[in-house]
Image: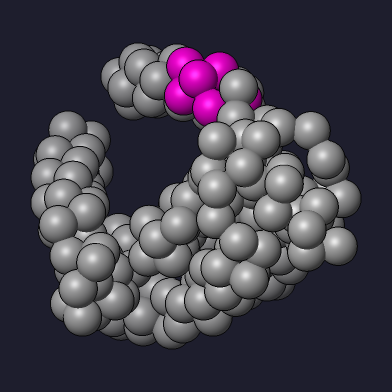
Amino acid sequence: MTHRATTLGQSLGYGISAEQRNKVLRNTYWLLAMTMVPTVLGAWVGVATGITQSLNGILGMVVFLGGAFAFIYGIEKTKNSAAGVPVLLGFTFFMGLMLSRMIAMTLGFKNGADLIMTAFAGTAGVFFVMASLASVIKRDLSGMGKWLFVGTIVLIVGGVINMFVGSTAGMMAMSMAAIGIFSAYMLYDIKQIIDGGETNYITATLALYLDIINVFQSLLALLGIFGGERD
């Protein structure tokens, strides 16, 4: 088994042992679980203080993109040092803070708490399915990366346009597309770890975390549109 796994990794051009790949995957899953704590804390702080309520439109996008790119740059610079994990956890707190505006809006529905739990359960289900698929699919999926990247760029452009148009139908379409794209990204990112294409567990955790957050907020948006109950 180990010999076959090592041969597969070498045939894909990675050349690291099955033991090393399993260690990266194990560390990634542990760190991914840890990222949920500062995310929830950040969301709670945002909802409790209302600090992000004024961050809408262009201002919200500038603050989000500026903060996100600064953190991602910091993670890239520290991923091979002891500072990498704290910087990543700081980023997840920031993401929770940015998510708090959407959480607060959802909690404005009579069934808001149920919608949030449903979105969380749905995201966990998607992750479980993608992780299971990644463990049984034998073919190399590295070619998916460029197509998923193009899809993400189209999604970002569509989001900017819809920010000015304010179309509910547009938001629904983009949310469904985002669920599809980032679910596929989960499969791609986990498979990269399993095949040895990603050897840094901090970078791997960042990629999977972004996949999860995008699926969660897209599910939450759809649930709010279709299932939100007002008093």
Q: Nearer the viewer, residue 93 or 57?
A: 93
The type of colouring in the image is one colour
Prevailing secondary structure class for the magenta stretch in the rendered image? helix
Q: Quadrant of residue 51?
A: bottom left
Residue 3 appears at what percent x and percent y? Answer: 78, 58
Residue at x 32%, y 62% (from the top left corner):
95
Q: Which residues are magenta?
A: 144-150
- Left or right of 76 on screen, residue 216: right
Residue at x 64%, y 46% (from the top left corner):
9
Residue at x 62%, y 35% (from the top left corner):
12
Considering the image in quadrants, where does the N terminus appear?
bottom right
Q: Nearer the viewer, residue 182 or 13?
A: 13
**Residue 145 forms part of the magenta stretch:** yes
* Residue 67 appears in the figure: no
* Residue 200 appears in the figure: yes
Residue at x 46%, y 24% (from the top left corner):
149
Q: Nearer the viewer, residue 196 or 90?
A: 196
**Residue 55 forms part of the magenta stretch:** no
- Left or right of 124 on screen, residue 41: left
